[in-house]
Image: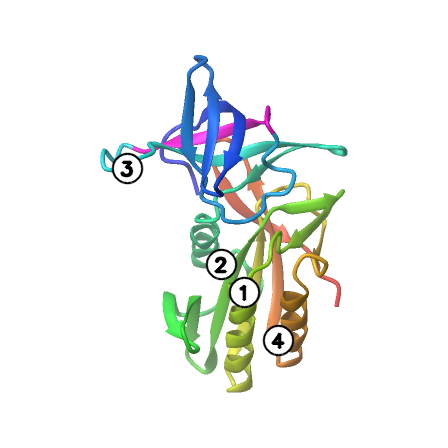
């Protein structure tokens, strides 16, 4: 996924009310930008961090700029992290179309945002002749509290817990179901659930795995010009 226009570098002043951030542009001007991330963003919203912004040409938008990337300064090093939670589905759609996710390759059709469960929409349904439909839910991952270990979630997610239950129900009916965790940072070599942050999600995950739901974890390659899906990260049982 290439950004349609060059990103604008800035310095983060503060993030607040979840969806807003104040930044200082290179000109010295201060601006309020949209933050498309409802999570805690632990370690990624430190004042003084270098951030990268996209600029919209839509005159109806209240905020013309959106926060896309942050240069996270961790004790173990510095890395670019994608914080826009609207991107993972587009990134996965590109990867599926290119056959870049081996476990999900070989299907004839890919449908997006399909209604299923009691009140959910699954991110993707993959269909192919002679094989059961595959229901795929995508979750954005950017939390890292230990060098190399990506974790999900970074805050309590009742919606995510519900999605696990919906996938488990589909698996029990004979469909294939997969939870795909997309890590929007390149410094992760391992993945785990943050059970201390959301025990209910961890418990629901265990039930979903027992019902036959697959768990896939993929990393991303990130630059200020584009984000692409990278290689698989193993998840311990």
Nearer to us of marks 4 and 3 is 3
- Checking the image for residue 208, the label placed there is 4
- Checking the image for residue 72, the label placed there is none
Residue 213 visible, this orientation:
yes
- Checking the image for residue 61, the label placed there is 3
Rendered location of residue 107, percent (x, y): 45, 70
Disc 1 element: helix
For the record, the magenta segment spans 47-56
Q: Is 53 inside the magenta-drawn segment?
A: yes
Q: Quadrant of the N terminus?
A: top left
Disc 4 element: helix
Rendered location of residue 25, percent (x, y): 45, 19
- Checking the image for residue 158, the label placed there is 1
Give 224 or 84, whichever is nearer the viewer. 84
User: If you read the primary sequence from the N terminus, does the residue marked by circle 3 or circle 2 appear first?
Assistant: 3
Residue drawn 68% across the image and 65% down it: 199
> Do the residues bearing badges 2 and 4 touch, measured as CB atoms within 8 Å?
no
Nearer to us of marks 3 and 2 is 3
Disc 2 element: loop
Could you give the CA–CA distance between mark 4 and mark 1, rounded to whole angstroms? 15 Å
Q: Is 62 situated left or right of 157 in this image?
A: left
Q: Is 104 inside the magenta-drawn segment?
A: no
Residue picked out by circle 2:
99
């Amino acid at each position: 996924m290439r950004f349609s226009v060059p990103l604008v570098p800035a310095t983060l002043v503060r993030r607040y009310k979840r969806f807003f951030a104040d930044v200082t542009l290179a000109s010295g001007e201060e601006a309020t930008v949209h933050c498309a991330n409802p999570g805690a963003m632990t370690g990624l919203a430190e004042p003084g961090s270098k951030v990268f912004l996209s600029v919209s040409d839509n005159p109806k938008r209240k905020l013309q700029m959106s926060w896309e990337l942050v240069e996270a300064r961790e004790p173990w090093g510095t890395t670019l992290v994608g914080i826009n939670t609207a991107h993972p589905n587009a990134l996965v759609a590109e990867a599926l179309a290119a056959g870049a996710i081996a476990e999900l390759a070989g299907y004839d059709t890919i449908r997006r945002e399909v209604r299923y469960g009691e009140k959910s929409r699954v991110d993707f349904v993959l269909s192919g002749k002679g094989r059961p439909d595959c229901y795929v839910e995508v979750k954005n991952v950017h939390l890292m509290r230990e060098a190399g270990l990506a974790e999900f979630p970074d805050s309590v997610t009742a919606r995510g817990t519900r999605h696990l239950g919906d996938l488990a129900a589909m698996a029990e009916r004979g469909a294939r179901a997969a939870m795909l965790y997309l890590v929007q940072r390149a410094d992760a070599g391992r993945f785990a659930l943050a059970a201390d942050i959301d025990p209910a999600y961890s418990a629901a995950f265990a039930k979903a795995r027992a019902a036959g739901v697959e768990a896939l974890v993929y990393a991303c390659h990130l630059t200020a010009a584009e984000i692409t899906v990278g290689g698989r990260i193993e998840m311990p049982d």
